[in-house]
Amino acid sequence: MAALQFTLQHQDAGSKARAGRIVTDHGEIQTPIFMPVGTVGSVKAVSQLQLEAEVKAQIILGNTYHLYLRPGLEILEAAGGLHRFNGWQRPILTDSGGYQVFSLAGTRKIREEGVTFQSHIDGSKHLFSPEYVMDIQRVIGGDIIMAFDECPPGGSEYAYARNSMEMTHRWLDRCLTRFNSTEDKYGYTQNLFPIVQGGTFKDLRQQSCEFISSKEATGNAIGGLSVGEPEPVMYEICEWCCDHLPAQKPRYLMGVGTPWNILECISMGIDMFDCVMPTRNGRNAMLFTTKGVINIDNKKWEKDFSPIDDGLECHTSNYYSKAYLRHLMKSKEILGLSIASIHNLAFYLWLVTEARKHIIAGDFASWKREQVEVLKTRL
Amino acid sequence: MAALQFTLQHQDAGSKARAGRIVTDHGEIQTPIFMPVGTVGSVKAVSQLQLEAEVKAQIILGNTYHLYLRPGLEILEAAGGLHRFNGWQRPILTDSGGYQVFSLAGTRKIREEGVTFQSHIDGSKHLFSPEYVMDIQRVIGGDIIMAFDECPPGGSEYAYARNSMEMTHRWLDRCLTRFNSTEDKYGYTQNLFPIVQGGTFKDLRQQSCEFISSKEATGNAIGGLSVGEPEPVMYEICEWCCDHLPAQKPRYLMGVGTPWNILECISMGIDMFDCVMPTRNGRNAMLFTTKGVINIDNKKWEKDFSPIDDGLECHTSNYYSKAYLRHLMKSKEILGLSIASIHNLAFYLWLVTEARKHIIAGDFASWKREQVEVLKTRL
């Protein structure tokens, strides 16, 4: 059992895109990669078999906030960790819970010690400190676990962003101290990724990248983007961070984004992505396809009996027609939510796999330019 | 393309149970059989691939009332029928819509001509006549379609039951006239099953069986049971009807029931069953297993990491633990609804397959006695 290893396999000549391989104790991940979000230990409306066989997911996320509240640590520990609890035997990454508790505006209080918040389920009060979040993630048992950071809102002022970043750095040191003084619970190695913050300010982001890099973690994450700032600013800060993070470690951009966001950020040197967009938008009738974006609620699909997307190898995307999926969504059938979620996730995995192929083939930049236009098309 | 054929393969020595084979243009069905209910063209929360690979369904139901309202006949006809619309290539049976429109108490009116009712979706007014229900089912394209009958409530008086039965018989003649003067729309043969009514009165039921049998349909159904009458009465009338319906035709008991109901009725000579119980109860946390009944919401399963049911060959029942399924149901995750539905349906299909094996092996009666006790156990 060994710490996460990252091998850079190819670097694109026309951009900063890279293809790599991450090795964890639960198996390999080909990068760039998209990670489906499994909030409470289930990727919403998608079974583990469907994740493997149809979506072809290589790694999934779990949300510390949700798992901590339900099923709770006692059950997760009794199960032997999340992999055993939900049956997913490939790698798992857990977030720190920070993002979720900050979203509970009104019921949470941020202090140096940590964050106090009220459960959205029963109103009970809890404290997440950097130390406790390490303990929780030890129990959940993700292969990759995240540092406890503060994520300031999109339009934050310089002073707020700086203070917040500085606290995030102090919290990182506390996370590392706790992480390094505790052991892997289930025999395989857990890896702690620190998170760059600093809002939309390049000097802060650079400072944060340098601080984070100095920890020599097995991978590094960029947080606090796609939280309300304009898209060009998101791209500018993302590229800036990539340029200031070590090349020999995987770079994970948290919570981003649309298919075109993902292609643009791959071209800047991002290796890992997660986002609820494919599942959440899928449940709301928005489909991403190899030919463009579809609102499957639209009457124009009523008699379109062609497959949802014949550009993918996914069984679900080929088996079901647009007209049938529209009917299911209109009828509020659960199967409609599953089909849309599986398809959108399969599309996201197809997207990063294609990106990887083109990085290796050496024509990523031109392929990306074409694809961004196609994928944004409203069908 | 040929009309439905039924071959009686084995008759149990210790009971009236039979094993048989139904051949339709969409394939074979081994009897006794349970048919999952696919209300609006989707078995709720279960994909077609899961129905084939995990549930091992041989035939599914569609509901005429629901399909008529949504997606509607224009779309179903443009698709080329329900098989092409939903991708299910094995046999389909459609009900007549009668049961659903009678359930719309207050908004429907029953007359000799037919039944007027208001859509539960938009309040629009519609008339289902015996002729129109044949036309609708021609468009939907089930391999087996059902006559339009009136199903009186469980505790109906003799006079009501007699008048209702007589109208059902007149309606059957109108159904047959229309059915015989119209053609299969999609190249394969559709079969019309008439329905025995007569409430809880043996003389009426006998009269109805004789009338229905005289039509020499390829199969016969028993309606108006499990609609509020006591269980012993249901069994008594079911057996009485079996005894008065031809042995060389499949007998379909509509809308029944629990696992033990199914075993008892198989022992009386029923060949085909349908019921929403496995899916509806599954969505409400009630699981039927080879070891008994489980309320998966119960705290006792919180740390039970054993498979949902290792007595089945179904992947889902073996892959997921009771504790994980409980967590998903508590968290109102869609995946929980899917797992419970797939498991319960796989259990129902296992049950009829086992019954068939024991009929062929010649020990059905003793096996049934043991099983009824086991299956009723509250775990």
Image (cartoon, coloured by chain):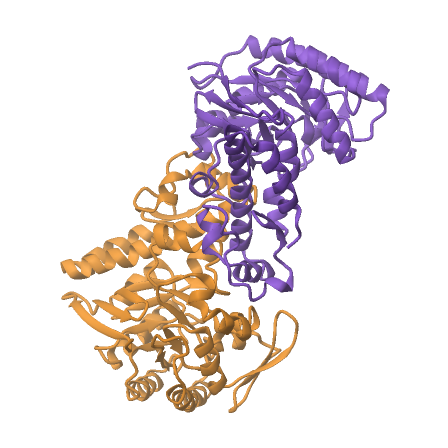
Chain colours: A orange, B purple
The percent coordinates of residue B327 (x first, y second) are 56, 62
The percent coordinates of residue A105 (x first, y second) are 58, 76
Q: Residue at x 36, y 73 (%)?
A: A143
> In the picture provided, is B165 more to the left or to the right than B129?
right
Compare residues B41 and B192 and report the one nearer the observer.
B192
Compare residues B364 and A129 and report the one nearer the observer.
B364
Q: Residue at x 63, y 34 (%)?
A: B262
Residue A136 appears in the figure = yes
**Image mark count:** 0
Quarter that holds the C terminus of chain B: bottom right
Residue B112 appears in the figure = no
> In the picture provided, is A186 more to the left or to the right than B13?
left
Compare residues A33 and B337 and report the one nearer the observer.
B337
Q: Residue at x 55, y 63 (%)?
A: B304
> In the picture provided, is B186 more to the left or to the right than B225?
left
Q: Where B127 sits versus A58, above or below?
A: above
Compare residues A15 and A45 and report the one nearer the observer.
A45
The percent coordinates of residue B16 (x first, y second) are 62, 24
Quarter that holds the N terminus of chain B: top left
The percent coordinates of residue A70 (x first, y second) are 56, 69
Q: Residue at x 50, y 84 (%)?
A: A132
